[in-house]
Image (cartoon, grey):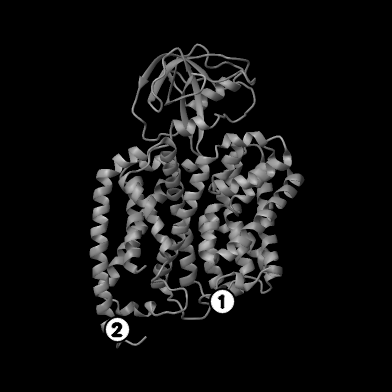
Amino acid sequence: MEERGSLADGARLAARGFVYVVVGGVALVAIVTIGSVLGPMFALDLATPAMAAWWTVFTSIAVQAMPFLLLGTAVSAGIGAFVPERVFSRVLPKKPTLAVPVAGAAGVVLPGCECASVPVADSLMRRGVAPAAALAFLLSAPAINPIVLIATSIAFPGNPAMVGARLVASLGTAVVMGWLWVRFGKEEWLPPRRTTGKGASPTGWRGFRDGLQHDFLHAGGFLVLGAAAAATFNILVPRSVLDVFTDSPWLSVLLLAVLAVVLCVCSEADAFVAASLSGFSPTARLAFMVVGPMVDLKLFALQAGTFGRAFAIRFSSVTWVVAVAGSVGVGWWLL
Amino acid sequence: MRFRTQGVLLLLCGAALLRVSLFSELYLRYVKEGLRPYLVMSGVLLLVLGVLGLVRRENGDGDHGHEDHQGLGHDHSRSPRIAWLLAAPALALLIYPPPALGSYSAEREEAKVAAQGVGTFPKLPAGDPVELTLNAFASRAQWDSGASMKGRTLRLTGFVTKDDDGRWYVARLFVNCCAADAAPLKVQVRGSKAPARDTWVTVTGTWHRTGKPGSDEARPVLNATSVQRVDQPSNPYEKR
Protein backbone atom coordinates (compact mmCIF):
# COMPACT_ATOMS: atom_id res chain seq x y z
CA MET A 1 0.00 0.00 0.00
CA GLU A 2 1.10 3.61 -0.43
CA GLU A 3 2.75 5.55 2.36
CA ARG A 4 0.38 8.52 2.12
CA GLY A 5 -2.60 7.53 4.18
CA SER A 6 -0.47 5.86 6.74
CA LEU A 7 -0.11 8.94 8.93
CA ALA A 8 -3.81 9.20 9.73
CA ASP A 9 -3.97 5.44 10.00
CA GLY A 10 -1.02 5.49 12.31
CA ALA A 11 -2.56 8.11 14.57
CA ARG A 12 -5.78 6.18 14.74
CA LEU A 13 -3.95 2.97 15.48
CA ALA A 14 -1.82 4.63 18.12
CA ALA A 15 -4.90 6.07 19.82
CA ARG A 16 -6.66 2.72 19.69
CA GLY A 17 -3.55 0.97 20.93
CA PHE A 18 -3.26 3.42 23.81
CA VAL A 19 -6.85 2.76 24.87
CA TYR A 20 -6.25 -0.98 24.62
CA VAL A 21 -3.15 -0.81 26.75
CA VAL A 22 -4.79 1.34 29.41
CA VAL A 23 -7.98 -0.70 29.56
CA GLY A 24 -6.16 -3.99 29.22
CA GLY A 25 -3.52 -3.00 31.73
CA VAL A 26 -6.04 -1.86 34.33
CA ALA A 27 -8.10 -4.99 33.78
CA LEU A 28 -5.02 -7.18 34.08
CA VAL A 29 -3.83 -5.51 37.27
CA ALA A 30 -7.32 -5.78 38.73
CA ILE A 31 -7.64 -9.43 37.79
CA VAL A 32 -4.25 -10.33 39.18
CA THR A 33 -4.83 -8.44 42.44
CA ILE A 34 -8.31 -9.81 43.02
CA GLY A 35 -7.19 -13.20 41.85
CA SER A 36 -4.20 -13.41 44.12
CA VAL A 37 -6.22 -12.25 47.12
CA LEU A 38 -9.43 -14.13 46.49
CA GLY A 39 -7.96 -16.89 44.37
CA PRO A 40 -6.80 -19.18 47.15
CA MET A 41 -10.08 -18.67 49.03
CA PHE A 42 -12.14 -19.35 45.94
CA ALA A 43 -9.97 -22.23 44.98
CA LEU A 44 -10.44 -23.80 48.38
CA ASP A 45 -14.17 -23.54 47.95
CA LEU A 46 -13.99 -24.97 44.49
CA ALA A 47 -11.46 -27.52 45.49
CA THR A 48 -13.59 -30.52 45.71
CA PRO A 49 -10.99 -33.17 45.00
CA ALA A 50 -12.46 -33.88 41.58
CA MET A 51 -12.34 -30.23 40.55
CA ALA A 52 -8.78 -29.87 41.80
CA ALA A 53 -7.76 -32.97 39.88
CA TRP A 54 -9.46 -31.59 36.78
CA TRP A 55 -7.46 -28.37 36.99
CA THR A 56 -4.23 -30.28 37.51
CA VAL A 57 -4.80 -32.61 34.57
CA PHE A 58 -5.95 -29.73 32.38
CA THR A 59 -2.90 -27.63 33.23
CA SER A 60 -0.59 -30.60 32.83
CA ILE A 61 -1.75 -31.32 29.31
CA ALA A 62 -1.39 -27.68 28.37
CA VAL A 63 2.08 -27.34 29.95
CA GLN A 64 3.29 -30.60 28.50
CA ALA A 65 2.15 -29.74 24.99
CA MET A 66 3.53 -26.19 25.02
CA PRO A 67 7.13 -26.97 23.97
CA PHE A 68 5.98 -29.34 21.25
CA LEU A 69 3.41 -26.93 19.94
CA LEU A 70 6.06 -24.24 19.84
CA LEU A 71 8.45 -26.56 18.02
CA GLY A 72 5.74 -27.42 15.51
CA THR A 73 4.78 -23.83 14.88
CA ALA A 74 8.45 -22.83 14.62
CA VAL A 75 9.07 -25.49 11.98
CA SER A 76 5.89 -24.51 10.20
CA ALA A 77 6.74 -20.80 10.31
CA GLY A 78 10.25 -21.65 9.12
CA ILE A 79 8.86 -23.54 6.15
CA GLY A 80 6.52 -20.68 5.39
CA ALA A 81 9.18 -18.01 5.62
CA PHE A 82 12.39 -19.58 4.37
CA VAL A 83 11.70 -22.62 2.21
CA PRO A 84 10.70 -21.73 -1.34
CA GLU A 85 7.98 -23.75 -3.01
CA ARG A 86 10.25 -25.26 -5.60
CA VAL A 87 12.10 -27.23 -2.93
CA PHE A 88 9.04 -29.32 -2.26
CA SER A 89 8.09 -29.74 -5.89
CA ARG A 90 11.62 -30.98 -6.55
CA VAL A 91 11.84 -33.35 -3.56
CA LEU A 92 8.40 -34.87 -3.77
CA PRO A 93 7.27 -36.94 -6.75
CA LYS A 94 4.89 -35.11 -9.07
CA LYS A 95 2.16 -37.70 -8.86
CA PRO A 96 0.25 -37.44 -5.57
CA THR A 97 -0.07 -41.25 -5.53
CA LEU A 98 3.71 -41.52 -5.30
CA ALA A 99 4.18 -38.45 -3.12
CA VAL A 100 1.95 -39.92 -0.39
CA PRO A 101 4.25 -42.76 0.72
CA VAL A 102 7.32 -40.52 0.47
CA ALA A 103 5.68 -37.88 2.66
CA GLY A 104 4.44 -40.54 5.05
CA ALA A 105 7.92 -41.95 5.49
CA ALA A 106 9.27 -38.40 5.90
CA GLY A 107 7.25 -38.27 9.11
CA VAL A 108 10.28 -39.90 10.72
CA VAL A 109 12.12 -36.60 10.80
CA LEU A 110 9.80 -34.51 12.97
CA PRO A 111 10.57 -35.36 16.57
CA GLY A 112 7.56 -34.50 18.62
CA CYS A 113 4.00 -35.35 19.34
CA GLU A 114 0.83 -34.73 17.47
CA CYS A 115 0.48 -31.09 18.49
CA ALA A 116 3.54 -30.30 16.38
CA SER A 117 2.39 -31.96 13.20
CA VAL A 118 -0.82 -30.05 12.51
CA PRO A 119 0.76 -26.61 11.92
CA VAL A 120 3.56 -28.21 9.90
CA ALA A 121 1.11 -30.02 7.62
CA ASP A 122 -0.79 -26.78 7.20
CA SER A 123 2.31 -24.88 6.13
CA LEU A 124 3.27 -27.70 3.75
CA MET A 125 -0.09 -27.32 2.03
CA ARG A 126 0.39 -23.58 1.88
CA ARG A 127 3.72 -24.21 0.18
CA GLY A 128 1.97 -26.11 -2.56
CA VAL A 129 2.50 -29.67 -1.37
CA ALA A 130 -0.38 -31.87 -2.49
CA PRO A 131 -2.93 -32.09 0.36
CA ALA A 132 -2.84 -35.89 0.21
CA ALA A 133 0.92 -35.93 0.86
CA ALA A 134 0.69 -33.32 3.61
CA LEU A 135 -2.06 -35.32 5.30
CA ALA A 136 -0.03 -38.53 5.16
CA PHE A 137 2.77 -36.61 6.84
CA LEU A 138 0.35 -35.20 9.41
CA LEU A 139 -0.74 -38.71 10.41
CA SER A 140 2.60 -40.48 10.33
CA ALA A 141 4.89 -37.88 11.94
CA PRO A 142 3.64 -38.17 15.54
CA ALA A 143 3.49 -41.96 15.40
CA ILE A 144 6.71 -43.10 13.76
CA ASN A 145 9.37 -40.62 14.81
CA PRO A 146 12.37 -42.08 16.66
CA ILE A 147 11.46 -40.63 20.07
CA VAL A 148 8.08 -42.32 19.99
CA LEU A 149 9.49 -45.61 18.75
CA ILE A 150 12.16 -45.64 21.45
CA ALA A 151 9.53 -44.86 24.09
CA THR A 152 7.50 -47.76 22.77
CA SER A 153 10.43 -50.15 23.01
CA ILE A 154 11.07 -49.02 26.60
CA ALA A 155 7.43 -49.48 27.51
CA PHE A 156 7.34 -52.98 26.03
CA PRO A 157 10.71 -54.41 27.03
CA GLY A 158 11.64 -57.61 25.26
CA ASN A 159 8.85 -57.20 22.77
CA PRO A 160 10.31 -55.63 19.60
CA ALA A 161 7.37 -56.96 17.60
CA MET A 162 5.24 -54.29 19.25
CA VAL A 163 7.54 -51.53 18.00
CA GLY A 164 7.53 -53.01 14.51
CA ALA A 165 3.79 -53.46 14.53
CA ARG A 166 3.29 -49.87 15.61
CA LEU A 167 5.58 -48.59 12.85
CA VAL A 168 3.93 -50.70 10.15
CA ALA A 169 0.34 -50.04 11.24
CA SER A 170 0.85 -46.30 11.66
CA LEU A 171 2.69 -45.79 8.40
CA GLY A 172 0.18 -48.03 6.61
CA THR A 173 -2.75 -46.06 7.96
CA ALA A 174 -1.15 -42.76 7.01
CA VAL A 175 -0.44 -43.90 3.45
CA VAL A 176 -3.90 -45.41 2.99
CA MET A 177 -5.44 -42.16 4.21
CA GLY A 178 -3.32 -40.21 1.74
CA TRP A 179 -4.42 -42.43 -1.11
CA LEU A 180 -8.04 -42.21 -0.02
CA TRP A 181 -7.69 -38.45 -0.19
CA VAL A 182 -6.20 -38.67 -3.69
CA ARG A 183 -9.15 -40.78 -4.80
CA PHE A 184 -12.08 -39.29 -2.89
CA GLY A 185 -10.89 -36.06 -1.30
CA LYS A 186 -12.46 -32.79 -2.34
CA GLU A 187 -10.63 -29.51 -2.38
CA GLU A 188 -13.64 -27.68 -0.95
CA TRP A 189 -13.45 -29.61 2.31
CA LEU A 190 -10.29 -27.72 3.03
CA PRO A 191 -10.37 -23.99 3.63
CA PRO A 192 -9.64 -22.01 0.46
CA ARG A 193 -5.91 -22.19 -0.21
CA ARG A 194 -4.75 -19.02 1.28
CA THR A 195 -1.54 -17.81 -0.19
CA THR A 196 -0.11 -20.13 -2.75
CA GLY A 197 1.02 -17.22 -4.89
CA LYS A 198 4.19 -15.24 -4.43
CA GLY A 199 4.56 -12.21 -2.27
CA ALA A 200 1.22 -12.65 -0.55
CA SER A 201 2.65 -13.23 2.88
CA PRO A 202 5.90 -11.78 4.12
CA THR A 203 8.96 -13.99 4.04
CA GLY A 204 12.26 -13.81 5.89
CA TRP A 205 12.57 -13.09 9.59
CA ARG A 206 9.49 -10.94 9.84
CA GLY A 207 7.38 -13.55 8.12
CA PHE A 208 8.82 -16.15 10.45
CA ARG A 209 7.96 -14.12 13.52
CA ASP A 210 4.47 -13.26 12.33
CA GLY A 211 3.77 -16.83 11.34
CA LEU A 212 5.08 -18.21 14.61
CA GLN A 213 3.07 -15.79 16.70
CA HIS A 214 -0.12 -16.29 14.76
CA ASP A 215 0.07 -20.07 14.49
CA PHE A 216 1.06 -20.54 18.11
CA LEU A 217 -1.83 -18.49 19.44
CA HIS A 218 -4.28 -20.01 17.04
CA ALA A 219 -3.28 -23.62 17.63
CA GLY A 220 -2.73 -22.93 21.33
CA GLY A 221 -6.34 -21.87 21.78
CA PHE A 222 -7.57 -25.08 20.24
CA LEU A 223 -5.07 -27.06 22.24
CA VAL A 224 -6.49 -25.62 25.46
CA LEU A 225 -9.97 -26.58 24.29
CA GLY A 226 -8.81 -30.13 23.65
CA ALA A 227 -7.01 -30.25 26.99
CA ALA A 228 -10.21 -29.28 28.77
CA ALA A 229 -12.12 -32.05 27.00
CA ALA A 230 -9.41 -34.60 27.75
CA ALA A 231 -9.24 -33.61 31.42
CA THR A 232 -13.01 -33.93 31.70
CA PHE A 233 -12.95 -37.48 30.36
CA ASN A 234 -9.93 -38.28 32.46
CA ILE A 235 -11.85 -37.35 35.60
CA LEU A 236 -15.24 -38.74 34.57
CA VAL A 237 -14.07 -42.13 33.34
CA PRO A 238 -11.81 -44.00 35.76
CA ARG A 239 -9.59 -46.39 33.88
CA SER A 240 -10.52 -49.28 36.14
CA VAL A 241 -14.00 -49.28 34.57
CA LEU A 242 -12.38 -50.65 31.44
CA ASP A 243 -11.29 -53.89 33.02
CA VAL A 244 -14.87 -55.08 32.68
CA PHE A 245 -14.44 -55.28 28.93
CA THR A 246 -11.15 -57.12 28.72
CA ASP A 247 -12.69 -60.50 27.95
CA SER A 248 -14.06 -59.92 24.48
CA PRO A 249 -11.25 -59.48 21.94
CA TRP A 250 -13.33 -57.46 19.46
CA LEU A 251 -14.94 -55.26 22.02
CA SER A 252 -11.62 -54.58 23.69
CA VAL A 253 -10.06 -53.38 20.42
CA LEU A 254 -12.93 -50.99 19.82
CA LEU A 255 -12.93 -49.89 23.44
CA LEU A 256 -9.24 -49.01 23.51
CA ALA A 257 -9.58 -47.28 20.15
CA VAL A 258 -12.28 -45.08 21.66
CA LEU A 259 -10.25 -44.62 24.82
CA ALA A 260 -7.33 -43.34 22.75
CA VAL A 261 -9.61 -40.67 21.31
CA VAL A 262 -10.91 -39.41 24.62
CA LEU A 263 -7.78 -39.69 26.75
CA CYS A 264 -5.55 -37.64 24.41
CA VAL A 265 -2.34 -39.02 25.85
CA CYS A 266 0.65 -37.52 24.08
CA SER A 267 2.14 -39.88 21.51
CA GLU A 268 5.40 -39.99 23.43
CA ALA A 269 3.66 -41.33 26.51
CA ASP A 270 0.87 -43.44 25.11
CA ALA A 271 3.04 -46.55 24.91
CA PHE A 272 3.42 -46.49 28.68
CA VAL A 273 -0.31 -46.14 29.15
CA ALA A 274 -0.87 -48.97 26.68
CA ALA A 275 1.63 -51.12 28.57
CA SER A 276 -0.23 -50.48 31.81
CA LEU A 277 -3.51 -51.68 30.29
CA SER A 278 -2.26 -55.16 30.91
CA GLY A 279 -5.61 -56.91 30.85
CA PHE A 280 -6.07 -56.24 27.15
CA SER A 281 -4.87 -58.22 24.15
CA PRO A 282 -1.74 -56.98 22.34
CA THR A 283 -3.85 -56.09 19.30
CA ALA A 284 -6.13 -53.88 21.40
CA ARG A 285 -3.11 -52.13 22.87
CA LEU A 286 -1.66 -51.70 19.38
CA ALA A 287 -4.95 -50.09 18.30
CA PHE A 288 -4.64 -47.71 21.24
CA MET A 289 -1.17 -46.64 20.10
CA VAL A 290 -2.07 -46.36 16.42
CA VAL A 291 -5.29 -44.43 16.89
CA GLY A 292 -4.02 -42.14 19.67
CA PRO A 293 -1.53 -40.04 17.67
CA MET A 294 -3.91 -39.78 14.70
CA VAL A 295 -7.34 -39.15 16.21
CA ASP A 296 -8.05 -37.64 19.58
CA LEU A 297 -10.06 -34.78 21.02
CA LYS A 298 -7.12 -32.43 21.30
CA LEU A 299 -6.02 -33.20 17.76
CA PHE A 300 -9.57 -32.85 16.48
CA ALA A 301 -9.79 -29.40 18.03
CA LEU A 302 -6.46 -28.45 16.45
CA GLN A 303 -7.52 -29.77 13.03
CA ALA A 304 -10.90 -28.08 13.22
CA GLY A 305 -9.14 -24.83 13.99
CA THR A 306 -6.58 -25.18 11.24
CA PHE A 307 -8.48 -26.87 8.42
CA GLY A 308 -12.09 -26.24 9.34
CA ARG A 309 -14.72 -28.38 11.01
CA ALA A 310 -16.07 -29.88 7.79
CA PHE A 311 -12.68 -31.34 7.11
CA ALA A 312 -11.89 -32.42 10.65
CA ILE A 313 -15.11 -34.43 11.08
CA ARG A 314 -14.73 -36.33 7.82
CA PHE A 315 -11.01 -36.83 8.13
CA SER A 316 -10.95 -37.91 11.77
CA SER A 317 -13.79 -40.39 11.47
CA VAL A 318 -12.35 -42.09 8.39
CA THR A 319 -8.89 -42.10 9.94
CA TRP A 320 -10.29 -43.79 13.03
CA VAL A 321 -11.84 -46.58 10.97
CA VAL A 322 -8.72 -47.08 8.85
CA ALA A 323 -6.47 -47.04 11.92
CA VAL A 324 -8.56 -49.64 13.75
CA ALA A 325 -8.69 -51.86 10.67
CA GLY A 326 -4.96 -51.39 10.15
CA SER A 327 -4.06 -52.31 13.71
CA VAL A 328 -6.30 -55.38 13.68
CA GLY A 329 -4.66 -56.51 10.44
CA VAL A 330 -1.12 -55.84 11.58
CA GLY A 331 -1.81 -57.22 15.06
CA TRP A 332 -3.09 -60.45 13.54
CA TRP A 333 -0.02 -60.61 11.31
CA LEU A 334 2.78 -59.58 13.69
CA LEU A 335 1.64 -60.01 17.28
CA MET B 1 -7.19 -9.62 18.04
CA ARG B 2 -4.36 -7.23 17.39
CA PHE B 3 -0.65 -7.45 17.81
CA ARG B 4 -0.79 -5.87 21.20
CA THR B 5 -3.26 -8.32 22.68
CA GLN B 6 -1.37 -11.11 21.00
CA GLY B 7 1.75 -9.83 22.69
CA VAL B 8 0.05 -9.79 26.08
CA LEU B 9 -1.14 -13.36 25.64
CA LEU B 10 2.32 -14.52 24.63
CA LEU B 11 3.82 -12.76 27.65
CA LEU B 12 1.30 -14.43 29.92
CA CYS B 13 2.08 -17.88 28.56
CA GLY B 14 5.82 -17.30 28.71
CA ALA B 15 5.68 -15.93 32.24
CA ALA B 16 3.51 -18.86 33.36
CA LEU B 17 5.96 -21.39 31.95
CA LEU B 18 8.96 -19.68 33.51
CA ARG B 19 7.23 -19.35 36.84
CA VAL B 20 6.72 -23.08 37.14
CA SER B 21 9.91 -24.28 35.46
CA LEU B 22 12.64 -21.71 36.09
CA PHE B 23 11.68 -19.89 39.28
CA SER B 24 10.25 -22.88 41.11
CA GLU B 25 9.96 -26.60 40.83
CA LEU B 26 6.20 -26.50 40.49
CA TYR B 27 6.44 -28.02 37.02
CA LEU B 28 7.05 -31.34 38.74
CA ARG B 29 3.38 -31.36 39.69
CA TYR B 30 2.44 -31.45 36.03
CA VAL B 31 5.10 -33.04 33.88
CA LYS B 32 8.12 -35.31 34.07
CA GLU B 33 11.48 -33.96 35.17
CA GLY B 34 13.16 -34.22 31.77
CA LEU B 35 10.90 -31.61 30.22
CA ARG B 36 12.33 -28.75 32.27
CA PRO B 37 14.87 -27.38 29.78
CA TYR B 38 12.26 -27.38 27.04
CA LEU B 39 9.79 -25.58 29.26
CA VAL B 40 12.38 -22.94 30.10
CA MET B 41 13.33 -22.49 26.45
CA SER B 42 9.67 -22.23 25.44
CA GLY B 43 9.04 -19.70 28.18
CA VAL B 44 11.94 -17.52 27.11
CA LEU B 45 10.96 -17.74 23.46
CA LEU B 46 7.37 -16.77 24.24
CA LEU B 47 8.52 -13.83 26.35
CA VAL B 48 10.77 -12.61 23.55
CA LEU B 49 7.98 -12.97 21.01
CA GLY B 50 5.58 -11.19 23.30
CA VAL B 51 7.94 -8.28 23.89
CA LEU B 52 8.63 -7.99 20.16
CA GLY B 53 4.91 -8.02 19.50
CA LEU B 54 4.36 -5.22 21.99
CA VAL B 55 7.35 -3.09 21.07
CA ARG B 56 7.04 -2.95 17.35
CA ARG B 57 3.73 -1.15 17.33
CA GLU B 58 5.01 1.45 19.69
CA ASN B 59 7.81 2.18 17.25
CA GLY B 60 5.23 3.20 14.69
CA ASP B 61 3.55 0.98 12.23
CA GLY B 62 4.73 2.35 8.92
CA ASP B 63 6.81 -0.66 8.03
CA HIS B 64 4.09 -3.14 8.81
CA GLY B 65 1.15 -1.30 7.39
CA HIS B 66 0.43 -3.65 4.57
CA GLU B 67 -0.33 -6.53 6.85
CA ASP B 68 -3.46 -4.91 8.14
CA HIS B 69 -4.83 -4.49 4.68
CA GLN B 70 -3.97 -7.81 3.30
CA GLY B 71 -7.27 -9.30 2.29
CA LEU B 72 -5.96 -12.71 1.46
CA GLY B 73 -7.20 -14.76 4.36
CA HIS B 74 -3.95 -15.61 6.07
CA ASP B 75 -3.66 -12.33 7.83
CA HIS B 76 -1.17 -12.50 10.63
CA SER B 77 -2.27 -9.35 12.37
CA ARG B 78 -5.47 -11.02 13.45
CA SER B 79 -6.00 -14.29 15.13
CA PRO B 80 -9.26 -15.78 16.27
CA ARG B 81 -10.74 -15.22 19.66
CA ILE B 82 -10.03 -18.82 20.53
CA ALA B 83 -6.48 -17.77 21.44
CA TRP B 84 -7.93 -16.19 24.58
CA LEU B 85 -8.40 -19.67 25.97
CA LEU B 86 -4.64 -19.78 26.47
CA ALA B 87 -5.13 -17.29 29.27
CA ALA B 88 -6.91 -19.92 31.40
CA PRO B 89 -3.99 -22.28 32.07
CA ALA B 90 -1.54 -19.36 32.06
CA LEU B 91 -3.42 -17.41 34.73
CA ALA B 92 -4.02 -20.59 36.73
CA LEU B 93 -0.28 -21.23 36.81
CA LEU B 94 0.54 -17.62 37.65
CA ILE B 95 -2.04 -17.02 40.34
CA TYR B 96 -2.91 -20.34 41.87
CA PRO B 97 -0.93 -23.28 40.52
CA PRO B 98 -3.17 -26.35 40.74
CA PRO B 99 -2.00 -28.86 43.38
CA ALA B 100 -0.36 -32.16 42.54
CA LEU B 101 -2.69 -35.10 42.08
CA GLY B 102 -3.25 -36.97 45.31
CA SER B 103 -5.50 -39.45 47.04
CA TYR B 104 -8.51 -38.65 44.87
CA SER B 105 -6.72 -39.94 41.78
CA ALA B 106 -4.93 -42.75 43.59
CA GLU B 107 -8.11 -44.19 45.11
CA ARG B 108 -9.95 -44.28 41.80
CA GLU B 109 -7.55 -46.66 40.16
CA GLU B 110 -6.28 -50.03 41.12
CA ALA B 111 -2.57 -50.10 41.77
CA LYS B 112 -0.70 -52.19 39.25
CA VAL B 113 2.89 -53.26 39.25
CA ALA B 114 4.31 -54.24 35.90
CA ALA B 115 4.10 -57.99 35.54
CA GLN B 116 7.67 -59.18 35.35
CA GLY B 117 7.51 -62.82 36.34
CA VAL B 118 8.71 -64.50 39.50
CA GLY B 119 12.45 -64.55 40.05
CA THR B 120 15.17 -63.46 42.42
CA PHE B 121 15.98 -59.78 42.81
CA PRO B 122 19.37 -58.19 43.49
CA LYS B 123 20.18 -57.74 47.17
CA LEU B 124 18.89 -54.59 48.80
CA PRO B 125 21.50 -51.90 49.40
CA ALA B 126 23.11 -51.70 52.83
CA GLY B 127 21.55 -49.40 55.40
CA ASP B 128 19.13 -49.50 58.25
CA PRO B 129 16.48 -48.55 57.40
CA VAL B 130 16.64 -48.92 53.61
CA GLU B 131 14.79 -46.27 51.62
CA LEU B 132 12.73 -47.89 48.89
CA THR B 133 10.44 -46.50 46.22
CA LEU B 134 6.92 -47.83 46.36
CA ASN B 135 7.47 -49.48 43.02
CA ALA B 136 10.56 -51.32 44.26
CA PHE B 137 8.74 -52.46 47.38
CA ALA B 138 5.64 -53.57 45.51
CA SER B 139 7.48 -55.48 42.81
CA ARG B 140 9.67 -57.27 45.36
CA ALA B 141 6.61 -58.08 47.44
CA GLN B 142 4.84 -59.57 44.46
CA TRP B 143 7.53 -61.21 42.37
CA ASP B 144 10.59 -61.91 44.51
CA SER B 145 11.06 -65.62 45.11
CA GLY B 146 14.25 -64.89 47.08
CA ALA B 147 12.38 -62.87 49.73
CA SER B 148 15.11 -60.23 49.66
CA MET B 149 13.19 -57.86 51.97
CA LYS B 150 12.84 -60.39 54.77
CA GLY B 151 14.20 -59.18 58.07
CA ARG B 152 15.15 -55.73 56.79
CA THR B 153 13.88 -52.43 58.14
CA LEU B 154 12.37 -50.49 55.24
CA ARG B 155 11.29 -46.92 54.76
CA LEU B 156 8.65 -45.69 52.31
CA THR B 157 7.44 -42.17 51.58
CA GLY B 158 4.10 -41.22 50.10
CA PHE B 159 0.68 -39.80 50.85
CA VAL B 160 -2.16 -41.49 52.70
CA THR B 161 -5.07 -43.13 50.92
CA LYS B 162 -7.78 -45.40 52.27
CA ASP B 163 -10.17 -47.96 50.91
CA ASP B 164 -13.72 -48.94 51.72
CA ASP B 165 -12.68 -51.80 53.97
CA GLY B 166 -10.89 -49.53 56.41
CA ARG B 167 -7.36 -50.34 55.26
CA TRP B 168 -4.97 -47.53 54.64
CA TYR B 169 -2.11 -47.22 52.23
CA VAL B 170 0.95 -45.16 51.63
CA ALA B 171 0.61 -44.23 47.97
CA ARG B 172 2.31 -42.38 45.20
CA LEU B 173 1.46 -41.71 41.59
CA PHE B 174 3.73 -42.71 38.76
CA VAL B 175 3.88 -40.22 35.90
CA ASN B 176 5.32 -41.13 32.53
CA CYS B 177 4.97 -37.87 30.70
CA CYS B 178 2.36 -35.62 32.26
CA ALA B 179 -0.14 -35.92 35.08
CA ALA B 180 -2.82 -37.04 32.63
CA ASP B 181 -1.21 -40.48 32.53
CA ALA B 182 -0.66 -40.85 36.28
CA ALA B 183 -0.97 -44.41 37.61
CA PRO B 184 -1.06 -45.20 41.33
CA LEU B 185 1.27 -47.36 43.41
CA LYS B 186 0.08 -48.35 46.87
CA VAL B 187 1.48 -50.24 49.82
CA GLN B 188 -0.89 -51.23 52.61
CA VAL B 189 0.26 -50.19 56.08
CA ARG B 190 -0.58 -52.31 59.13
CA GLY B 191 -0.11 -51.75 62.82
CA SER B 192 -0.59 -48.00 62.96
CA LYS B 193 -3.58 -45.71 62.96
CA ALA B 194 -4.32 -43.98 59.67
CA PRO B 195 -3.44 -40.30 59.40
CA ALA B 196 -5.80 -38.05 57.43
CA ARG B 197 -6.05 -38.57 53.68
CA ASP B 198 -3.38 -36.86 51.61
CA THR B 199 -1.03 -36.41 54.58
CA TRP B 200 2.52 -37.01 53.45
CA VAL B 201 4.20 -39.60 55.63
CA THR B 202 7.38 -41.61 55.93
CA VAL B 203 6.57 -45.10 57.11
CA THR B 204 9.26 -47.29 58.66
CA GLY B 205 8.66 -50.95 59.19
CA THR B 206 9.10 -54.47 57.93
CA TRP B 207 7.69 -56.35 55.01
CA HIS B 208 4.62 -58.44 55.73
CA ARG B 209 4.44 -61.54 53.58
CA THR B 210 0.89 -62.29 52.40
CA GLY B 211 1.31 -65.16 49.98
CA LYS B 212 3.44 -67.07 47.53
CA PRO B 213 5.31 -64.78 45.10
CA GLY B 214 3.48 -64.48 41.80
CA SER B 215 0.12 -65.50 43.27
CA ASP B 216 -2.79 -63.15 43.71
CA GLU B 217 -2.35 -63.24 47.47
CA ALA B 218 1.09 -61.66 47.27
CA ARG B 219 0.22 -58.03 47.92
CA PRO B 220 2.53 -55.24 49.08
CA VAL B 221 1.99 -54.83 52.83
CA LEU B 222 4.19 -53.20 55.47
CA ASN B 223 4.09 -53.71 59.23
CA ALA B 224 4.75 -50.22 60.47
CA THR B 225 6.86 -49.45 63.50
CA SER B 226 6.69 -45.71 63.03
CA VAL B 227 4.72 -43.28 60.90
CA GLN B 228 6.10 -39.76 60.60
CA ARG B 229 4.55 -36.76 58.96
CA VAL B 230 6.77 -35.11 56.36
CA ASP B 231 6.48 -32.24 53.92
CA GLN B 232 5.41 -32.98 50.40
CA PRO B 233 8.60 -33.61 48.41
CA SER B 234 9.33 -31.25 45.53
CA ASN B 235 8.67 -34.08 43.14
CA PRO B 236 5.38 -35.47 44.40
CA TYR B 237 5.35 -38.36 41.95
CA GLU B 238 7.19 -41.65 42.06
CA LYS B 239 10.78 -41.59 40.85
CA ARG B 240 11.27 -43.44 37.61
Secondary-structure class at tag 1: helix
The tag earlier along the polypeptide, 1 or 2, is 2
At label 2, counting other C-alpha atoms closer than 10 Å, the crowd grade (few under 14, some 14-19, many 20 or more) is some
Relative to A177, is B240 above or below?
Answer: above
Q: In the displayed image of the protein, which residue is found farthest to the front?
A: A45
Q: Chain of mark 2?
A: A
At label 1, counting other C-alpha atoms closer than 10 Å, the crowd grade (few under 14, some 14-19, many 20 or more) is few
For the residue pair A15 and B190, the one nearer the viewer reads as A15
For the residue pair A289 and A308, the one nearer the viewer reads as A308
Secondary-structure class at tag 2: helix
**Circle 2: residue type:** Ser
For the residue pair A258 and B28, the one nearer the viewer reads as A258
The spot of residue A215 in percent (x, y) is 45, 64
Check residue B89 in the rendering and tell me which mark sits there, or answer none: none
The spot of residue A288 in percent (x, y) is 63, 45
Relative to B199, is A171 above or below?
Answer: below
Pointer 2 residue: A6
Q: Is residue B83 visible?
A: yes
Marks 1 and 2 close (CB-CB < 8 Å):
no
Quadrant of the snapshot with the N terminus of chain A: bottom left
Q: Is residue A258 toward the left or the right of residue A33 in the image?
A: right
Write the residue at 53% across / 77% down.
Answer: A196
Residue A162 sits in quarter:
top right
The spot of residue A120 in percent (x, y) is 52, 63
Check residue A86 in the rendering and tell me which mark sits there, or answer none: 1
**Circle 1: residue type:** Arg
Q: Is residue A313 toward the left or the right of residue A11 in the image?
A: right
Same chain, labels 1 and 2: yes
Residue B79 sits in quarter:
bottom left
Write the residue at 61% across / 73% down.
Answer: A188
The spot of residue B135 in percent (x, y) is 51, 28
Q: Is residue A53 toward the left or the right of residue B19 in the image?
A: right
